[in-house]
Image: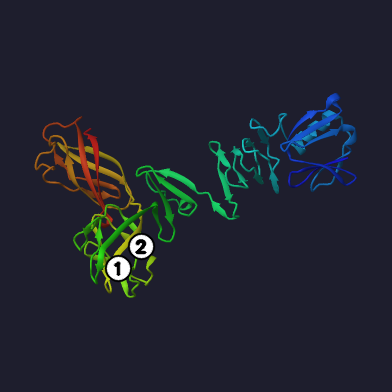
């Protein structure tokens, strides 16, 4: 009688070429009464008694068979080491932990779980692919897992890495993306691909990297809708939130947006219809639409800078009940305030320094001291002042003389940061004069 470990991991028992039993490689092993052999019960409940006196050959494909002439203790040891991933008696219950110690190093092997098992993989030198549908898999080193079906939970121990592809029942693959977190967008080339998502802890928003535009865009979609009730003639500006837009009034822009498409209706199904979007009094998007009654129009992505208004104008023959919905994503603005300090220069002069990370800031202005005026001269609350850039990311206010000795005094300071395209934001910080 011969025991064969197939390359698939399946264990076969044959006698003169006839298959007597096929077993899964995960099984509980126990001694047969009288210690005459070993009983294997696999996770599917199949049982086979290996009587020591009947076993004369062992084979691990693709190697040739070898002779076996040991006792029962030798048999159970070789079965545990080379043929089965041994688990406690009662294999297949939800309490079992299946452990493999690096023997899955080639081809595709299957470790069968029943949906409530924990499969633990340790000390892999070179892992093959492990299929365990429905089970919870704990990986303690870098391995590759083919979950085989949706619904498997992958738990990774601290310090581990995993490469995984999920296959749906429709037989197409979806890549599982890595999510990285930080205050500012990662700049290393390895992250600037479609394989990563970035969670901005500062903004509490998820971004993906658009390789075509070389910028981080929000996963969240932003919609700006315009419309006009009744007849909509040539040159009419549509309404937004009930307000008639114009070159001076419109939707308030507070984020840097990336517009890539819009939805529209064309009730009369007319040709030669188009829409123009204005930021302030500047046309930024002009797009003709087909005569479809309802449609979706893709456009070359356009960056819309904040702190202006957005308006939409209808061009063409009079239509009815026009509605246009601009599709946008938020563009990440490269900025992070890192420190604010007041530095003594001697002779009663002190300098305000502001440090930040990022390349989008062009001006820091409107410095307001919320407590009593520490400087001599004009009050910054009523006469806002600006900082000068001394070097990359380091901005300073010209030296001023304090009234009295300000050492040890703490002040709340409000700074207004102005960036590329008019982007602006305020931050309040507390500084102590050293």
Q: Where is residue 173? Give x, y as percent.
A: 57, 54
- Secondary element under disc 1, as helix, strand or loop, is strand
Instruction: For marks 1 and 2, give the CA distance.
Output: 10 Å
Residue located 22% across and 38% down the image: 342
Q: Earlier in the sequence, mark 1 or mark 2?
A: 2
Q: Nearer the viewer, residue 387 or 130?
A: 130
Q: Quadrant of residue 181?
A: top left
**Residue assigned mark 1:** 275
Residue 312 % position (x, y): 26, 64
Residue 39 position within the rendered picture, expressed as x and y whole percent measured from the top left = 80, 31
Viewer-side residue, 352 vs 215: 215
Quadrant assignment for the C terminus: top left
Up/down of 316 relative to 70, above or below: below
**Disc 2 designates what residue?**
262
Does residue 411 appear in this view?
yes
Percent coordinates x, y for residue 169 in the rendering: 60, 52
- Note whether 289 is above or below 333 in the view shown: below
Residue ID at (34%, 56%): 223
- Is 195 positioned to the left or the right of 129 in the image? left
- The circle drawn on residue 291 is none
* Residues under numbered marks 1 and 2 in contact, where contact means CB atoms less than 8 Å apart: yes
**Which SS class for mark 2?**
strand
């Amino acid at each position: 009688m011969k025991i064969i470990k197939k390359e698939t991991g399946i264990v076969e028992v044959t006698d003169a070429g006839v298959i007597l039993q096929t077993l899964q490689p995960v099984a509980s092993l126990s001694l047969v009464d009288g210690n005459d052999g070993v009983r294997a019960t696999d996770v599917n409940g199949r049982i086979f008694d290996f009587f020591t006196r009947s076993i004369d050959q062992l084979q691990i494909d693709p190697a040739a068979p070898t002779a076996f002439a040991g006792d029962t203790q030798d048999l159970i040891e070789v079965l545990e080491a080379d043929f089965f991933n041994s688990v406690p008696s009662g294999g297949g219950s939800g309490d079992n932990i299946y452990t493999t110690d690096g023997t899955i190093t080639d081809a595709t092997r299957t470790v069968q779980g029943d949906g409530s098992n924990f499969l633990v993989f340790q000390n892999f030198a070179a892992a093959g692919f492990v299929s365990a549908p429905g089970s919870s898999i704990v990986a303690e080193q870098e391995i590759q897992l083919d979950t085989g079906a949706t619904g498997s939970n992958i738990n990774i121990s601290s310090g581990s890495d995993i490469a995984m592809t999920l296959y749906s029942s429709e037989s197409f693959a979806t890549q599982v993306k890595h999510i990285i977190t930080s205050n500012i967008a990662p700049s290393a080339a390895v992250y600037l691909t479609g394989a990563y998502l970035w969670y901005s802890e500062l903004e509490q928003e998820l971004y993906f990297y658009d390789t075509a535009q070389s910028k981080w865009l929000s996963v969240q979609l932003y919609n700006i809708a315009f419309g006009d009730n009744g007849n909509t003639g040539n040159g009419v500006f549509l309404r937004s939130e009930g307000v008639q837009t114009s070159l001076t009034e419109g939707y308030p822009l507070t984020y840097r947006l990336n517009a890539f498409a819009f939805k529209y209706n064309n009730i009369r199904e007319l040709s030669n219809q188009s829409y123009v979007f204005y930021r302030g009094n500047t046309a930024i998007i002009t797009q003709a639409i087909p005569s479809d009654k309802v449609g979706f129009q893709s456009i070359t992505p356009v960056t819309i800078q904040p702190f202006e208004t957005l308006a939409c104008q209808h061009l063409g023959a009079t239509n009815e009940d026009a509605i246009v919905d601009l599709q946008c994503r938020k563009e990440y603005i490269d900025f992070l305030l890192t420190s604010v300090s007041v530095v003594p220069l001697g002779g009663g002069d002190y300098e305000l320094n502001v440090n930040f990370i990022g390349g989008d800031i062009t001006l820091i202005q409107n410095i307001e001291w919320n407590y009593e005026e520490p400087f001599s001269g004009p009050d910054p609350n009523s006469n806002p002042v600006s900082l000068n850039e001394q070097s990359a990311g380091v901005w300073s206010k010209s030296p001023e003389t304090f009234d009295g000795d300000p050492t040890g005094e703490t002040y709340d300071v409000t700074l207004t940061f102005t960036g590329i395209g008019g982007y602006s934001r305020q931050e309040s910080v507390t500084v102590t004069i050293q």
